[in-house]
Image (cartoon, grey):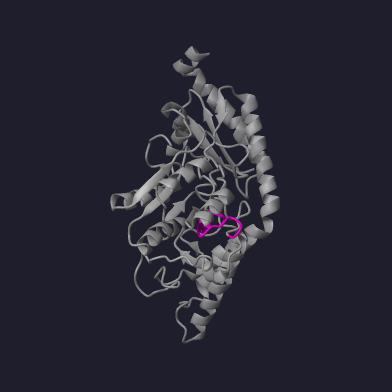
């Protein structure tokens, strides 16, 4: 076992060596522009892009023509939400939830500021929306779009996607989901889930950073999305810009590997997570697990350690890479909006740690992290007047 140990796989993942191997020719020898159709360099690049498009589509049960390449899930979210609203006249009713990723929350807030109506659904104590709340929001005013995160990036909670999609389909409302944390880790099927738009990120599934995709349904219904970036009309006119061929090849390879290994890897990660959780709970009191323990990602664990500040705890564990929340908001020392939406107080939210287990983590690492964390928490609590008074 080597130190430091990386357990922040929700923030980003290590590039799989097999993905790098697939990318290498397109970083060196096959360097044509995929839009250059007058010579072999361009043709080779275009063929690589189309192969990757099919690989991405296969992982989510889509057709290759429904995949639009972007720079990542944040751009995909912006394109899906802003693009649908603009295609429907620039204003409309959008329904989302309180625990969304900032890429969705901030996009919806921008739309709200510019004339759209946004309904922000609450979540239950496990972080899942209630279908009756969604139905109630439909009854108030028909939305142009529902956008609900597939699996939460902080607590791992998986939403009832099939039920949400069925309700949207029944009411004739478009359904978008940010599936950056779900794709490649759990089964995702856009047709079974009645999903009309779906965001994907390469670096969450052991692919390169700076590449992602947006699934846009072509039939039943055909989804109209207005471009948000102008110039050149690439990607069926939805996303202009010279294609990142090496990144696209890497995303395709990452999807291919994830699809082939998903079942066995999910079982391994769930066992590893449960081992880590059990050891921590056996060694410490006043600890709670946040989010759903039934409906969650296999490698996800979020825990609150009462009377311990999470930032201080992580400082005491410099040989382990962990997080106190989303990497997209970690620059701000403020309580997690996700944990607050679950009902945690500010102090408890500031006492929470996110463990993100991934493809390259081992049992030996999980055991080390558990024992190291137990030791540091005990030492910090010995120094805490609040804990001494509480006990």
Q: Which residues are magenta?
A: 191-206
Q: Residue furthest bottom?
A: 38
Is residue 118 at least partly visible in the picture?
A: yes
Q: Is residue 119 left or right of residue 157?
A: left
For the N terminus, the image quarter is: top right
Residue 13 visible in the shown view: no
| Residue at 37% across, 50% down | 108
Give the camera-side residue of 317 and 163. 163
Q: Residue furthest front?
A: 139
Residue nearer the viewer, 255 or 67: 67
Q: Position of residue 104 (x, y in %)?
A: 42, 50
Q: How many marks?
A: 0
Q: Position of residue 16 (x, y in %)?
A: 59, 57
Does the magenta-highlighted stretch encompass residue 107? no
Whether residue 201 appears in magenta in the rendering, the answer is yes
Q: Is residue 294 above or below residue 72?
A: above
Who's the residue at 29% across and 52% down the image?
115
Q: Is residue 210 above or below residue 132?
A: below
Identify the image quadrant of residue 367.
Answer: top right
């Amino acid at each position: 076992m080597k130190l430091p140990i990386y357990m922040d796989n929700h923030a980003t993942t290590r590039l799989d060596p097999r993905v790098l191997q697939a990318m290498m020719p397109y970083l060196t020898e096959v360097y044509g522009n995929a839009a250059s159709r007058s010579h072999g360099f361009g043709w080779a690049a275009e063929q690589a892009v189309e192969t990757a498009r099919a690989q991405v589509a296969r992982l989510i049960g889509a057709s290759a023509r429904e995949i639009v390449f972007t720079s990542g899930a944040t751009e995909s979210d912006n394109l899906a939400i802003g693009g649908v609203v603009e295609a429907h006249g620039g204003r409309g009713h959008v329904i989302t939830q309180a625990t969304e990723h900032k890429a969705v929350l901030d996009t919806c807030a921008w739309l709200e500021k510019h004339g759209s109506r946004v309904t922000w659904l609450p979540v239950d104590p496990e972080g899942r929306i209630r279908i009756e709340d969604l139905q109630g929001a439909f009854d108030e005013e028909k939305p142009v779009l529902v956008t609900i995160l597939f699996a939460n990036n902080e607590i791992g909670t998986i939403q009832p996607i099939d039920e949400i999609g069925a309700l949207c389909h029944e009411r004739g409302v478009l359904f978008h989901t940010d599936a950056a944390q779900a794709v490649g880790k759990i089964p995702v099927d856009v047709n079974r889930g009645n999903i009309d738009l779906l965001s994907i990120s390469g670096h969450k599934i052991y692919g390169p950073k700076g590449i992602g995709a947006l699934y846009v349904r072509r039939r039943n219904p055909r989804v109209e999305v207005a471009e948000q970036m102008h110039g050149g009309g690439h990607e069926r006119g939805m996303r202009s810009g010279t294609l990142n061929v090496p990144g696209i090849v890497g995303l395709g390879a990452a999807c291919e590997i994830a699809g082939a290994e998903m079942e066995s890897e999910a079982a391994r990660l769930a066992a590893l997570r449960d081992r880590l959780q059990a050891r921590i709970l056996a060694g410490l009191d006043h600890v709670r697990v946040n989010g759903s323990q039934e409906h969650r990602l296999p490698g996800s664990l979020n825990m609150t350690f009462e009377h311990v500040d999470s930032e201080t705890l992580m400082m005491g564990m410099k040989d382990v890479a962990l997080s106190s929340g989303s990497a997209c908001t970690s620059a701000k020392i403020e309580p997690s909006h996700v944990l607050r939406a679950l009902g945690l107080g500010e102090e408890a939210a500031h006492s929470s740690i996110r463990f993100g287990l991934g493809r390259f983590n081992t049992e030996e690492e999980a055991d080390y992290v558990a024992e190291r964390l137990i030791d540091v928490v005990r030492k910090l609590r010995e120094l805490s007047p609040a804990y001494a008074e509480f006990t």
